[in-house]
Amino acid sequence: MDEETGRPDPEKFALLSADHEPPETTAMNLALFDLDHTLLPIDSDYTWCQFLIKTGILNATEYEERNQRFYEQYKAGTLDIYEFLSHQLKPLAQNSRKQLDSWHERFMQEEIEPHVLPQAVELVQNHLSAGDDCILVTATNSFVTRPIATRFGIAHLIGTEPESRDGEFTGGVHGTPSFREGKVTRTHDWLSSRGKNWSDYERVYFYSDSINDLPLLEKATHPVATNPDDRLAAIAQQRNWSILKLFE
């Protein structure tokens, strides 16, 4: 534990005790968390699509190959976000919100809850207990991720926003997707909407696994490469950033 900040020392995180209370601090900090392969050891967007295929809601022949291809493109840093979203948001437009909410409850129980690991919950709780502003910042759409943010105790979510009309999804995107540079834009907009600036915070933490998040990692004063992919791990080592392994 860093005695100055009361935050987890990434290299010693596994040694934290569950009942450790961070010291009181008057400094306001901002803690930003990516979700997929950062707080969760899975990709929630990919898993949502696979869940819909597994339960017979989506046609496996039509969706499985494309879902896997988009996932590989994301990991490689070559994903066209708008092509991906036109595919990924289509099931939201094809089903009622009531039906989607029902499926999502089952998705949370069967696919997400088994992957909510105590060390990830503890990381978030340390920041919350210290009084930090905490935001989940994810490229995955907010329909899929809002209940996951709630499960981690994070009240604020910046996710890609599906367009809706009269309470039902249209299959389109509202505003800027929170992907790559879009995460910086959307976080800036979130701060501005609350009359805040990046400089209002003594420390800005961002925890992420992906090279796709390099723009927001570079914006943070305290970037933490969390379960990093190979390219992000190399950059983190070159720049002497903290590296945190929450899980294998």
Image (tube, grey):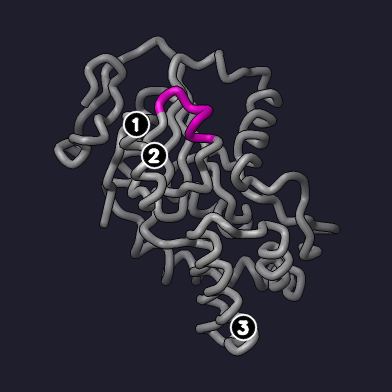
Q: Which residue is mark 2?
A: 235
Q: Quadrant of residue 18?
A: top left
Residue extent of the magenta highlight: 216-222
Instruction: Pick out the residue farthest to the right.
Output: 166
Residue at image position (36%, 23%) is 130
Secondary element at image label 1: loop
Viewer-nearest residue: 154 or 35 = 35
The CA distance from mark 1 to mark 2 is: 8 Å
The reply to whether residue 184 is in sight is yes
User: How many residues crowd mark 3 within 10 Å: few (<14), some (14–19), many (20+)?
Assistant: some
Viewer-nearest residue: 12 or 146 = 12
Is the residue under label 2 in contact with that under label 1 (CB below 8 Å)?
A: yes
| Mark whose residue sits in front, 3 or 2 | 2
Nearer-N-terminus badge (3/2) = 3
Secondary element at image label 3: loop
Secondary element at image label 2: helix
Residue at image position (75%, 75%) is 94
Three-letter code, disc 2: Ile
Q: Which residue is mark 1?
A: 241
Question: What numbered label is drawn on residue 57?
Answer: 3
The reply to whether residue 105 is in sight is no
Three-letter code, disc 3: Ile
Q: Quadrant of residue 1?
A: top left
Q: How many numbered marks, from 0 up?
A: 3
